[in-house]
Image (cartoon, coloured by chain):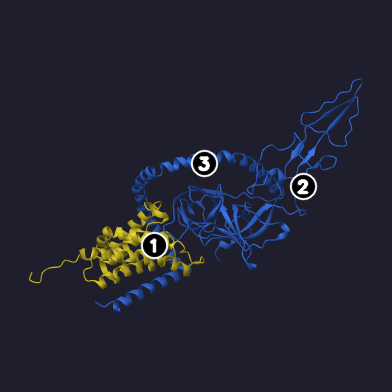
Chain colours: A blue, B yellow
Amino acid sequence: MAVYTVNRRRAIILLILSSVLLLTLDLRGNPLIDRTRSAFANVLSPFETAGRVIANPIRDVWHGATDYDDLAKENERLRDQIAQQRGAELTARAVIGDYQELLAQDGLTSNYLTVTARVVGGAPGNFEQTVEIDRGAQDGLQVGMAVINQGGLVGKVTKVYDDRSVVRLVTDTDYTIECKVAAVNRAPGVGGAPAEETSTDGAATGGTVPGDSTTTEATTPSGEKVSDLSTTTTTSTTTTTPGDATSTQTTIPGQTTIPGQTTVPGQTTTTVAPTTTTVPMLVTRETGGCTGRGAGKLPAMEYVTENPVFGPIAVGDVITTTGGSTSLAPPDLIIGEVINKVSRAGTAGPLLEIKLGANLDQLYFVQVVLYRPTSEVPG
Amino acid sequence: MEALLRRPILRTVPVGLMLIALQRSAFENVHPFGVVLQIVLALCAAGGIAGGPERGAWLGFVLGVMFDLGNGFPLGQHGLAYGLAGFVAGCVNVVAVDPHWWLQLIFVSVGGAVGEFSVPVVQTFVTDGGWQGQRLYRILPVIAVTCALASFAFTPLGRWCLAIRKKTWKPRNE
């Protein structure tokens, strides 16, 4: 039997040509194909529901039998993690409160309406990083809207049907978003360099005053103590009452006497506990592009020109979205933190590998931000 | 009416719908060695075994286009890849008139692997993401083995979809 025949050659040529034709039509945006796709999704829906009804109990039994030990261990680990994060969460909550207040004062707002959706499906192939959610055009979703969860940015909506949508994850190689590195300014003498603790008389004490220092060891993602990153202003009030015969001095325990202060015998001194105001000094260091690199690889931030004026970018620095008219997402959504910094030769600049804030392996519920970037609006 | 019902397209479409639904539900979270099993691809390769390269390519193309439609991929991406899988697997009928079962397993494995390999190759041309096949060394063996195992069930199904009667050899004097 001949391996190469006219029919066989014709079959393979037809296959390739048909596929290329369909690809060309689809990639150029054919409304007929879009309608066909939507209709096919509606036809497929009952089959899929039936498939889930049949498959879910079997899958649950399988996972229950095989993953029980792992789940128990993971549960313990997560409980520990929650306990550790409780302190950090309180600190973060205070910082966010201040931040929102500042935004409100500036007439800005970061509040966008969101739609909560349940993740109902994963990627059907091995080369895509997508999930499917149970909200669609009926709920106001549109292509291009950002998807987040409590951990941070998850991805963006790429296909919208009536009652479901497909979300491309941040890790997909087709996903790129403008982002910025926000961190504490470590360079001395620039803008918000960490200020020294000052007393009311303007003299730097050069040490921690017992009794008015922050006792929690809250740290930023980069591992620095929050107390090191803040401007601390200490105020003390001294009330002096003329005395008569006896000389008494009342000092609240833990309060130190400010150097240079003279206590006159025969006076009663009352010292009020100092108040401490903490203002975080986070600054934007660099902007760049955050790109997914596929399954099993961390997303990376590229096009970073490290400016020595702002000090080096360090592991743990927070990466957020930049926002703006061309960005895929509103500003200041958390993407993740720098977990590795790869130096590259030439003008390429460093490549920052990002540990995502959102755990994409365990997505159950997400929120779709009802914000459509102008770059995603057709025409 | 019976002739109408024997048309391959009328058999392939409902079978494809069911398999795509199963792919998106039952096999969604089953990832042996971190690989998503591809049962639609397995049917394409098994169809090639049953019907030869031309019919295998046709079955793969139809199922692939359905897969693209159902999953929001660029139309024709999986059509081409799965068509190639069916074609390659069907070549077993070119090298042997009545191939042994182990030869069929080899061809269906190779067909499945070729089909899965074609997906990132086509993606490289139609998306902005560049080459995405870095994990192929792990994906291809798993896909090849699952295609081979599934072919025991899918070869008769592919034969039914293509409306082909099983070959039966009769003595000349009958």
Disc 1 residue type (three-letter) = Leu
Which numbered circle lies on residue B140? 1
CA gap, disc 3 to disc 2? 37 Å
Marks 3 and 2 on same chain: yes
Q: Disc 2 designates what residue?
A: A195
Disc 3 residue type (three-letter) = Leu
CA gap, disc 2 to disc 1? 58 Å
Residue B78, position as x, y percentages in the image: 40, 65
Locate the N terminus of chain B by quadrant: bottom left
Residue lying farthest bottom? Answer: A6
Residue lying farthest left? Answer: B173
For disc 3, the neighbor class at 10 Å (few under 14, some 14 to 19, many from 20) is: few
Which numbered circle lies on residue B59? none
User: Answer yes or no: do the residues labelled 3 and 2 have beta carbons within 8 Å?
Assistant: no
Which numbered circle lies on residue A78? 3
* Mark 3 belongs to chain: A
- Say above or below: A357 vs B61: above
Q: Secondary structure at mark 3?
A: helix
The quadrant where residue B10 appears:
bottom left
* Mark 2 belongs to chain: A
Q: Secondary structure at mark 1?
A: helix
